[in-house]
Amino acid sequence: QGRVGSGPRPARRLGAAAMASSSSGSKYDAVIKGGLKLKGSDKTLKEVGLKAGGKKKKSQHQEELEQLKEMAIKAVEENKSLEASATRGPTAAEKAYKLAREKREKQRTTEAIQFTHRQRMDRFNAHLGSLSEHFDIPKVGPG
């Protein structure tokens, strides 16, 4: 009673052996024992698709096979058309875009190699010097 957390103790749980012995009699008295009995006089299982007379359903099975074959043929044709369209050449718009991109790239490279880094910095400093004091960086703090 002087222990920490001394409240009501939880109920003890019974082991599996104790539960099995107490409940085995009453719950399972109504169970019917024996093998599973199927309708029909034959003791052997019939194949799927067989009628009671033993004839196979050929027409439905053949129709399904034909539909599957048609679907496969269509899929092959679609794949061929996709492959053909993937191997086509560039369109006129694609060619024009490529030419314009190459022209812009060439122009950028010629501008980049026209001046050295020092010449670019000198031009940039001259540009900053030509601006009015409005664009100067304000002094903040002591000094």
Image (cartoon, helix red, strand yellow):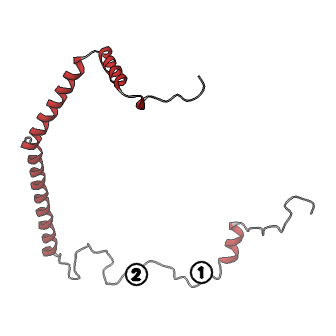
Q: Residue at x 34, y 84 (%)?
A: 39
| Drawn side of residue 9 relative to residue 15, left or right | right
Which quadrant is home to the C terminus? top right
What residue is shown with label 2?
A: 37
Identify the disc placed on residue 116.
Answer: none
| Drawn side of residue 18 relative to residue 68, left or right | right
Q: Where residue 83 appears, x then y in whole percent?
A: 11, 47
Kindly indicate the quadrant of the structure image that contains residue 90.
top left
Looking at the image, is mark 1 or mark 2 nearer the viewer? Answer: 1
Which is nearer the N-term, disc 1 or disc 2?
1
What residue is shown with label 1?
A: 28
The local secondary structure at tag 2 comes to loop
Q: Where residue 94 appears, x then y in whole percent?
A: 11, 41
Q: Residue at x 22, y 74 (%)?
A: 49
Residue 27 seen from this side: yes
Q: Residue at x 13, y 71 (%)?
A: 63
Q: Which of 57 and 99 lies nearest the eye of the viewer?
A: 99
The local secondary structure at tag 1 comes to loop
